[in-house]
Image (cartoon, helix red, strand yellow):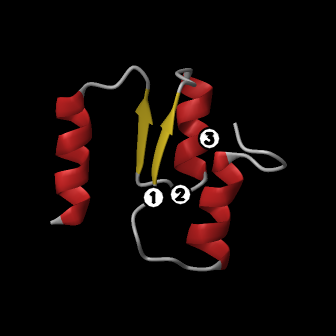
Amino acid sequence: MLPGINGYEVCRILKRKLRIAAPVVLLTGKTSRFDKLRGTFASADVYLTKPLSIEHLNTTLKRYLS
């Protein structure tokens, strides 16, 4: 949880307002379908939920850092 703003809004600002081309990966404990959909609507490239396996994290990082 971020003070005064949530991760979805940060993502929206980065992707839509600032037009940042870098991938945005949301890592959260929120696992509902609604929350995942909010991540998609916020233009997140990946929505990862906790608990997260190190293999899944490594795969995601390799995909975007290569």
Q: Residue 30 appears at what percent x and percent y? A: 57, 25
> Eyeballing the image, is 23 above or below 32?
below
Helix, strand or loop at disc 3?
helix
Residue assigned mark 3: 38
Q: Are marks 2 and 3 in contact (CB under 8 Å)?
A: no
Callout 1: few (<14), some (14-19), or many (20+) C-alpha neighbours within 10 Å?
A: many
Residue 43: give its label: 2
Instruction: Write down the quadrant of residue 15 in the picture.
Output: bottom right
Image quarter (top left, top right, bottom left or bottom right) of the N terminus: top right
Q: Earlier in the sequence, mark 1 or mark 2?
A: 1
Q: What is the quadrant of residue 34 in the picture?
A: top right
Residue 16 or residue 27, whichever sits in front: 27
Say if 22 sits above or below 3 in the image: below
Report how many numbered discs are placed on residues in the image: 3
Q: Residue at x 67, y 76 (%)?
A: 17
Disc 3 marks which amino acid?
Answer: Arg
Q: Is residue 29 left or right of residue 25?
A: right
| Amino acid, disc 2 | Ser
What residue do we see at 65% from left, 49% from top? Answer: 8
- Asked whether the residues under the numbered discs 1 and 2 touch, taking CB atoms below 8 Å apart as contact, a structural biologist would say yes
Q: Residue at x 22, y 30 (%)?
A: 54
Identity of the residue furthest to the right in this view: 4
Amino acid identity at mark 1: Val
- Circle 1 SS class: loop
48 sits to left or right of 63: right
Q: Nearer the viewer, mark 1 or mark 2?
A: 1
Residue identified by numbered label 1: 24
Q: Earlier in the sequence, mark 2 or mark 3?
A: 3
Marks 3/1: CA–CA distance: 14 Å
